[in-house]
C-alpha cells in the first residue's frame, strides 16, 4: 500500500447513540482523502458489518471489519470483579485479517452477549485464546487495560498484560495503540506505551478513535451522548469526551498529529495490507429439512401440496376450474424446486403445523407470500391467490434469485413456544432473532434535542408541531416544506 494512513479505530452509527458516522458519508470521506482502507470497530457489536463491507467495496475502499470489544477484568462469567476501581470492563480493538478471523470475531461477539453480558457484552482472555486465529488486536483507548494500568502508574502490570496479549495473538498481530487527541491522560498513556514498545519490542500503531465525521460535528455528538445517558448539556456530570479531535482526519492531519510516532502511522498501512477479508456473500445457508423415508424434500413437498390443495378445494369450493389450480400448483412447484427452496417451504410448513397443533393462533399471512398457491395449500397462508388474482412472481421469481420471504405471525403471548420448538428442533446455535433498529422521527428528534438543550417545552412543542404530518419525513424535508422552520 502506498504511503498513507488507515483509520483502524472508528465508530459508526451502530455504536448506538455513541458513534455518529453514517456509513455512506464515511466511505465517501475516506475516498476523498485517498486513504486505501478503513476499519469499522463499533462498541461490542458487528451490527453494521455487511452494510459497511458492501459500501466500502463499492467505493473501491478496502473494508476492515472489527469490533471494540468489552473485556471483563477476570472471567466473563463473573458479574462483577470486586475491587476494580474504574469499570467492570476494559476496551480492546479486534480486527479480522481474513475469513477465519471474521468467523472467530462472530463467535467472540456472540459469546460476549450470551455468556458475558453484565451491562455490556464482555469477552475475556480465556475465549480470546480459543478464538484468536485470524485476528489482529490493538491495545485500545484510555479505557484499555494497558493504558489504564499506565495511568495507575503500574508499569509492571501493564507490561504483564501486554505480554499476555502478545502470547494470545502472536508477536506479529498485537499492537500498542497510541492516540493524538490532546488529552493529558492520553499523553501519559502514550509515554508509557512507547516505553513498553521499546522494552518488549511491540509495534505501535496510531488511531484516532473516530466517533464523528468532521470536527464541527463535535457539538452535535455531545448532544447525542446526552440522549444516550438521559442528561442535559449543562449537567456537569454528563458523559463527555473533553476533546473535539475524535473525527475522521485526513492523512495530512494524522501525520502532523503523530509527528513523534512516524512508525505508528506507517503501521496502519502495514495492518491494512495484512487484512484481506473476502466474504462469501449472496449465498444461502438453510437448515436441511429431513424428509420421511422414501421421499426427497422435493417429492415430499409435492405430495403435501397436492393433498393440501385437494383438502382446500373441498373445504372452500371455487368457481375457478380445478385444472387451473393444478396447473398453477405444478408451475409453482417447478420454480420452487428448481431454485432449491423445497426445504425452506417444508421448514415453514412444519413450524406452522406445530403452532396449529398446540392451538396457538396463527395469522392468515401477509406480504408477497399470499401470492403462492403452494403456501395456501400447505396452510402457511389462508388466502386463495387465484380468487384474489395474486401473482406468484411477486413472491418468487426465477428471473430474480432471492430467498423467499414468508412472514409468520403468532399469538404474542405464546410465540415463545414456537421459538422454543424451532430451537429444540434445529439447535440453539442455528436459530436467531433478527434485530430491528428504531430511529427518531423528525418531531421526536426536535423534542429530544430541545430537552437536552433545556429549551422551554412550549417553544419546543411549537417548533415540533410545524413538522408536516408525513410518514418518515426527515428534518431537511420538513425545513424545505415549511418556511416557518427556516426562520
Image (cartoon, grey):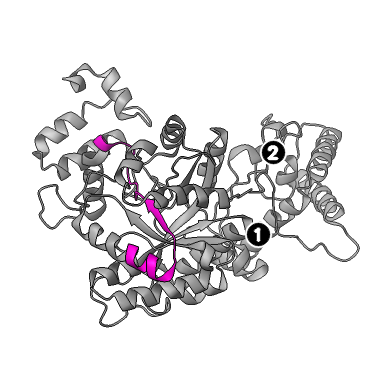
Q: Position of residue 61 (x, y in %)?
A: 53, 37
Q: Position of residue 463 (x, y in %)?
A: 17, 29
Secondary structure at numbered mark 2: loop
Q: Residue 355 versus residue 257: which sits nearer the camera?
A: 257
Q: Which mark is residue 427?
A: none
Q: Position of residue 51 (x, y in %)?
A: 52, 42
Quadrant of image for the N terminus: top right
Whether 241 is among the magenta residues is no
Q: Which mark is residue 384?
A: 2
Q: Position of residue 404 (x, y in %)?
A: 67, 43
Q: Which residue is mark 1?
A: 351
Q: Tell me if residue 481 can be seen.
A: yes
Which residues are the magenta region? 194-216
Q: Is residue 295 above or below residue 53?
A: below
The residue at 10%/55% (across/down) is 236
Judge depth for marks 1 and 2 and give the one in front: 1
Horizontally, is 198 left or right of 298 in the view?
left
Q: Residue 359 versus residue 404: which sits nearer the camera?
A: 404
Task: Name the residue furthest bottom.
Answer: 82
Q: Is residue 197 above or below residue 183?
A: below
Q: CA distance from mark 1 to mark 2?
A: 20 Å
The residue at 72%/43% (across/down) is 316
Whether 215 is among the magenta residues is yes
Residue 140, quarter of the rendered image: bottom left
Q: Residue 39 versus residue 157: which sits nearer the camera?
A: 157
Amino acid at each position: 500500500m502506498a504511503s498513507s494512513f488507515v483509520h483502524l479505530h472508528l465508530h459508526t452509527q451502530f455504536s448506538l447513540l455513541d458513534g455518529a458516522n453514517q456509513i455512506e458519508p464515511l466511505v465517501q470521506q475516506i475516498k476523498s482523502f485517498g486513504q486505501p482502507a478503513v476499519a469499522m470497530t463499533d462498541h461490542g457489536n458487528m451490527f453494521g458489518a455487511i452494510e459497511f463491507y458492501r459500501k466500502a467495496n463499492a467505493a473501491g475502499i478496502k473494508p476492515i471489519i472489527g469490533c471494540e470489544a468489552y473485556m471483563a477484568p477476570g472471567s466473563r462469567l463473573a458479574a462483577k470483579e470486586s475491587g476494580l476501581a474504574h469499570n467492570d470492563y476494559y476496551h480492546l480493538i479486534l480486527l479480522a485479517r481474513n475469513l477465519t478471523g471474521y468467523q472467530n470475531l462472530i463467535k467472540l461477539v456472540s459469546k460476549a452477549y450470551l455468556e458475558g453480558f453484565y451491562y455490556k457484552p464482555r469477552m475475556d482472555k480465556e475465549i480470546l485464546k480459543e478464538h484468536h486465529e485470524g485476528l489482529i488486536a490493538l491495545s485500545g483507548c484510555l479505557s484499555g487495560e494497558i493504558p489504564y494500568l499506565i495511568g495507575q502508574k503500574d508499569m509492571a502490570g501493564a507490561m504483564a498484560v501486554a505480554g499476555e496479549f502478545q502470547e494470545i495473538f502472536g508477536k506479529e498481530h498485537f499492537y500498542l495503540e497510541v492516540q493524538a487527541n490532546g488529552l493529558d491522560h492520553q499523553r501519559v498513556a502514550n509515554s508509557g506505551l512507547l516505553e513498553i514498545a521499546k522494552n518488549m519490542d511491540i509495534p505501535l500503531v496510531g488511531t484516532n478513535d473516530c466517533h464523528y465525521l468532521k470536527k464541527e460535528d463535535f457539538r452535535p455528538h455531545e448532544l447525542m451522548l446526552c440522549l444516550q445517558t438521559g442528561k442535559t448539556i449543562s449537567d456537569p456530570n454528563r458523559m463527555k469526551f473533553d476533546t473535539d479531535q475524535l473525527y475522521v482526519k485526513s492523512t495530512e492531519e494524522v501525520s502532523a498529529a503523530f509527528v513523534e510516532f512516524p512508525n505508528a502511522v506507517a503501521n496502519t498501512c502495514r495492518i491494512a495490507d495484512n487484512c484481506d477479508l473476502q466474504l462469501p456473500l449472496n449465498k444461502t445457508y438453510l437448515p436441511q429439512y429431513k424428509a420421511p423415508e422414501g421421499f426427497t424434500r422435493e417429492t415430499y413437498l409435492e405430495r403435501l401440496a397436492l393433498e393440501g390443495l385437494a383438502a382446500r378445494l373441498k373445504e372452500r369450493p371455487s368457481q375457478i376450474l380445478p385444472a387451473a389450480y393444478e396447473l398453477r400448483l405444478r408451475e409453482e412447484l417447478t420454480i420452487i424446486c428448481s431454485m432449491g427452496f423445497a426445504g425452506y417451504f417444508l421448514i415453514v410448513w412444519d413450524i406452522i403445523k406445530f403452532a396449529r397443533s398446540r392451538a396457538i393462533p396463527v395469522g392468515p399471512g401477509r406480504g408477497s407470500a399470499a401470492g403462492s398457491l403452494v403456501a395456501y395449500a400447505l396452510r402457511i397462508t389462508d388466502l386463495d391467490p387465484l380468487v384474489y388474482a395474486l401473482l406468484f412472481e411477486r413472491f418468487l421469481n426465477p428471473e430474480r434469485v432471492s430467498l423467499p420471504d414468508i412472514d409468520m405471525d403468532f399469538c404474542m403471548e405464546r410465540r415463545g413456544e414456537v421459538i422454543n420448538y424451532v430451537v429444540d428442533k434445529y439447535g440453539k446455535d442455528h436459530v436467531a432473532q433478527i434485530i430491528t433498529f428504531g430511529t427518531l422521527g423528525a418531531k421526536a428528534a426536535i423534542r429530544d434535542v430541545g430537552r437536552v438543550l433545556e429549551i422551554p417545552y412550549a417553544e419546543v412543542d411549537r417548533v415540533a408541531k410545524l413538522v408536516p404530518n408525513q410518514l418518515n419525513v426527515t428534518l431537511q424535508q420538513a425545513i424545505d416544506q415549511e418556511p416557518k422552520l427556516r426562520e
